[in-house]
Image (spheres, helix red, strand yellow):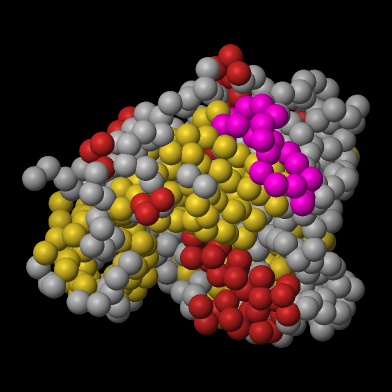
Amino acid sequence: MKTVSLRGLAAALVFAAVATPAAPAADWKPAGDRIKTVWAEKVSPTNPLPEYPRPLLVRDQWQNLNGLWDYAITPQAAAAPAAFDGKILVPFPVESSLSGVQKGVGAGSRLWYNREFTVPAAWAGKKILLNFGAVDWEARVEVNGNHVGTHTGGYTPFSFDITPHLKKDGANKLVVRVYDSTGGFQPRGKQVPNPGNIWYTPVTGIWQTVWLEPVPVENHIGGVRTESDIDNNTLAVFVDAAKTENTDAEVRLLDKGQVVATAKGAVSGKITLNVANPKLWSPDSPFLYDLEVTLLSGGTTKTETVKSYTAFRKISMKRDGSFPRFQLNNKYLFHFGPLDQGWWPDGLYTAPTDEALLFDIKKTKEWGFNMIRKHVKVEPARWYYHCDKEGMLVWQDMPNGDGGGSWDPKRKGGGRDVNRNAASKANFYKEWKEIIDLCRPHPSVVVWVPFNESWGQFDTQQVSAWTKKYDPSRLVNAASGGNYRDCGDIFDLHDYPFPRIIRLRDKKAVNVLGEYGGIGLSIQGHLWGQKSGWGYIGSEDKAGLTKRYVGFARQLEQHVRDCFSAAVYTQTTDVESEVNGLMTYDRKVIKIDEAKVRTANQAVIKAMEK
């Protein structure tokens, strides 16, 4: 049998998806007159974001439900609307231009979605799963008037088995009711009701792909996760199945279609593959192996097969002189990258196309960086997939929620953590676990960041310890730039705008400069609506910004030789009124001399090489 690689399969599945009826294209156009990316023109109301949404668990049959849905905004206490306000283009949030609506919702209202769908006749006899990439924040889902489930949390995927509620023939009615306060203990990142400076427009509702897929009634695979051990040349595979009793999984590891290792074991434990001389993943050589996982009932009967991928890599720390340093694959490596907000002028949280989603990552790599800090936002699975393929290290933040404590970044042990109530703490752990579950299978993700500065920071030692215990294979940056507690693996300072002489150091943890920079440059014709923008420090033109950036990089080189193991520059793009990006919000103007910045960045990374 011919084996198809994941990369080829994922592309092919764009066309393998079952077509879904859509409302006429005339019912949609981008709303508002603010700046847009070049990809906005490529958004099709009949087929938005058609790519397969979950590259780590690929099935060969699925139905994309993105497209034009009915929408309505009602008072919070109101019943389901008798009539809808118009059409919205899913999966763009209702506040965005590409939704075709561009209206706020707010804490006193609810957002309703409605559409019809049919299940292909070829799926008869299968269990049908309804999948959501992400909905911000509470989603209550009905099919044909029956409540099928409710999910809270704005950043992670969820699924419901809708089989018992489907009609035998004809169209099925799908209704989603959303509530999002953009406040309280809800993790919300940079979203605020009154945006300005470093705070941005609220995002409500469906903002990632919605799709259907058929799975076997007897049993199906719910997830695949791997952990590599490059010191012992083994790969541990963990298979999540709907039913675990009397169920095994057979795993095949492939290199460009050639099987290099196989193993079989119970889905209730880990399945270990031995691989002689595995090819290692790194930013310079992001090699990915393909995986095929087959579920077996009673040890022999095949239930289903899914495709995935994995990599061999090790993230660790090792003392170098007086200070611990980052290592990748047992070699010292300086982590250097931008603070990446992940916002779009036309789609807000949602990139207009998959090409756009990839663009920022490729540009970051071209500028000579090897890392991205994903800042108080979580991306769709395809973003992490692109980082895996391109060879980009990722520091993953937990989006902040609740209030802020007192912040004292100038001394160890300073400041005061937030006194969150029980509901707030429980929700934090629930959503943080779901975020880790989403990102954990991706080899590009190497550092967890539970807190940024003092935003919602609470029980720091306990949160850090829980994170490390839940995923011991990665490093924990307990509070990036926040109130330092003696916990985690990393001591993280923020210093704007200059990467100045280090005022604090820690000889037990990896020392990093978690944020610096913020050189602002307003480019007329590419602003969010204001006449000028906000930055931590200004520059007059491209040459001036580049000169200042390179000067900062040369300062940073000395700090790398001293004790720093990572640095994060603010930031990848302008966002709304904030103009301290290396390119404009619409991605149409690169604000730096790319060659000079790349040379400077590579010099910083090489400053730690031995």
Q: Nearer the viewer, residue 39 or 45?
A: 45
> Magenta stretch: residue 26 in it?
no
Question: Residue at the spot x=82%, y=50% of the render?
Answer: 108
Q: Is residue 290 above or below residue 47?
A: below
Q: Nearer the viewer, residue 39 or 136?
A: 136
> Magenta stretch: residue 81 in it?
yes
Question: Residue at the spot x=56%, y=32% of the render?
Answer: 69
Point out the stretch of residues depicted in magenta: 69-90
Q: Nearer the viewer, residue 359 or 3?
A: 3
Residue 392 in picture, x, y percent from top left: 50, 51
**Quarter containing the N terminus:** top left
Which quadrant holds residue 238?
Answer: bottom left
Total number of numbered discs in the rendering: 0
Residue 425 in picture, x, y percent from top left: 70, 76
Question: Residue at the spot x=66%, y=70% of the render?
Answer: 427
Residue 11 in picture, x, y percent from top left: 34, 35
Residue 145 visible in image: yes
Q: Is residue 591 above or below residue 599?
A: above
Q: Nearer the viewer, residue 434 or 344?
A: 434
Is residue 248 shown left or right of residue 100? Answer: left
Residue 389 visible in image: no
